Image (tube, helix red, strand yellow):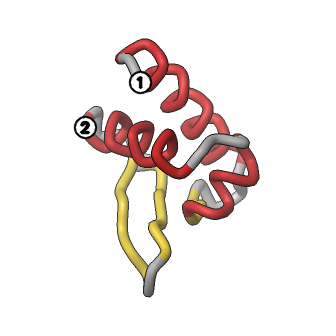
Amino acid sequence: MDIESIGTWAGEVYKALEASQTHTLGDKEIKKATKLKKDQIMAALGWLGREGKVAITTEDKDIIATLVGE
C-alpha cells in the first residue's frame, strides 16, 4: 500500500459517492460500486476525510460516508 494507490482508491470512492443520488453510501455499497477491498476502502475514506470531502458515521456495524457540501 503506497500513497499513490490510496489516492487512486480515494478517487474511485469519491466518484461512487458522487454518482449516488443521495451522495451517501455504506461501506458495502462502496465495495460493490468500486470492487475495492475493505482495507482499501478504509484507507480511501481516511484520505477523503482528512481532505474534508466526506463525513463518516457509523450505523450499527456499517460505516456510512457522505460527501460534504453536496
Q: Tag 2: residue type?
A: Arg
Name the N-terminal-most of marks 1 and 2. 1
Element type at mark 2: helix
Element type at mark 1: loop
Do the CB atoms of the residues marked 1 and 2 lie less than 8 Å apart? no
Give the label, 1 or 2, closer to the camera. Answer: 1
Nearer the observer, 31 or 37: 37
Residue 12 point in image, percent of width and height? 61, 32
In this view, 65 is above or below 62:
above
Residue 40 point in image, percent of width and height? 50, 39
- Residue at the left extreme of this rendering: 50
Nearer the observer, 53 or 3: 3
Looking at the rendering, which quadrant does residue 7 occupy? top left
Q: Tag 1: residue type?
A: Met
Q: Residue at x 37, y 37 (%)?
A: 48
Residue 41 point in image, percent of width and height? 50, 45
Q: Disc 2 designates what residue?
A: 50
Mark 1–mark 2 distance (CA, rounded to whole Å): 18 Å
- Which mark identifies residue 42? none
Query: As drawn, is 47 to the left or to the right of 5?
Result: left
Q: Residue at x 63, y 41 (%)?
A: 36
Crowdedness near tag 1: few (<14), some (14–19) or many (≥20) residues, C-alpha within 10 Å: few
Nearer the observer, 39 or 17: 39
Looking at the rendering, which quadrant does residue 9 occupy? top right
Nearer the observer, 2 or 56: 2
In this view, 69 is above or below 60:
above
Q: Residue at x 53, y 51 (%)?
A: 38
Query: As drawn, is 5 to the left or to the right of 28?
Result: left
Query: As drawn, is 66 to the left or to the right of 35?
Result: left
Q: Disc 1 designates what residue?
A: 1
